[in-house]
Image: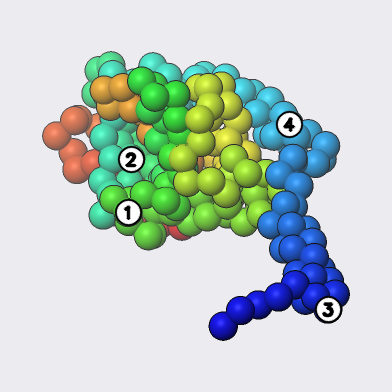
């Protein structure tokens, strides 16, 4: 079969090409309001982290561990202090590759721990911000903190925590931290409130 270009076919092809160009070349530049939201979220997170450093020793933990099945993070501090909280995974920053991979794209993260990351993805679609809708983003650590701060604000979480495992940094949102002053021998879930997320 031979197709010859005639006026009708050429016009149809041009109209079709223009339609698909418009459809797939939507602006990928976030709006000024979206950028302002990122900035204000980051500033709020910094203030919160400073307050948490005073109230529950944020950033002064000796170690941390996370139970992916229970969705609980445990912080161990000097002495017999420990703290627990529900958490959600935001994403993982790979320091050696300068990349951030969203939790919603990680099959190794249980679906129940991706809720807050999915809120960020929806926000990214609504505001045309490709960093929130791309599985893995090339970015700086500071940019990853901005993504995490925006996710915290969207989810209404109490804080953002970044835990290190080798050259990977796991960003998480947390609920209220419950400090346990009992002996370390006490079960990690003692005095924890019911699950919120």
Q: Residue tagged by mark 2?
A: 73
Label 3 vs 4, first from the N-terminus? 3
Q: Residue tagged by mark 4?
A: 40
Q: Residue tagged by mark 1?
A: 107
Front tag of 2 and 3: 3
Please give the name of the residue rendered at 74% of the width and 52% of the height, measured from the top-left corner: 26
Residue with the most extreme left position: 185
Q: Secondary structure beneath disc 2?
A: strand
Residue 104 spot, x, y in % from top left:
45, 52
Q: Residue tagged by mark 3?
A: 8
Please give the name of the residue rendered at 58% of the width and 36% of the height, measured from the top-left corner: 147
Question: Residue 94 versus residue 165: which sits nearer the camera?
Answer: 94
Please indicate, yes or no, whether residue 101 appears anywhere in the rendered image.
yes
Mark 1: give few (<14), some (14-19) or many (20+) Cα within 10 Å: few
Q: Viewed as shown, does residue 120 lie left or right of 16? A: left
Q: Distance from label 2 to label 3 (Cα)?
A: 65 Å
Front tag of 2 and 4: 4
Label 3 vs 1, first from the N-terminus? 3
Q: Distance from label 1 to label 2 (Cα)?
A: 20 Å
**In which quadrant of the rendered image does the N terminus lie?**
bottom right
Label 2 vs 4, first from the N-terminus? 4
Residue 141 spot, x, y in % from top left:
50, 22
């Amino acid at each position: 079969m031979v197709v010859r270009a005639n006026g009708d076919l050429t016009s149809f092809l041009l109209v079709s090409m223009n339609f698909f160009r418009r459809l797939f070349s939507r602006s990928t530049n976030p709006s000024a309001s979206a950028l302002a939201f990122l900035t204000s979220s980051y500033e709020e997170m910094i203030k919160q982290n400073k307050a948490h450093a005073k109230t529950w020793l944020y950033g002064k933990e000796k170690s941390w561990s996370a139970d992916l099945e229970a969705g609980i993070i445990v912080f161990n501090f000097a002495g017999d202090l420990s703290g627990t909280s529900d958490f959600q995974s935001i994403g993982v920053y790979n320091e050696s590759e300068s990349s951030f991979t969203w939790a919603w794209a990680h099959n190794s993260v249980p679906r129940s721990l991706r809720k807050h990351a999915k809120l960020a993805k929806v926000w990214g679609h609504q505001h045309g911000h490709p960093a929130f809708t791309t599985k893995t983003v090339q970015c700086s650590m500071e940019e990853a903190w901005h993504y995490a701060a925006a996710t915290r604000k969207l989810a209404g979480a109490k804080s953002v925590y970044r835990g290190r495992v080798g050259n990977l940094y796991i960003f998480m949102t947390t609920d209220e931290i419950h400090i346990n002053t009992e002996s370390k021998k006490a079960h990690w879930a003692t005095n924890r409130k019911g699950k919120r997320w």
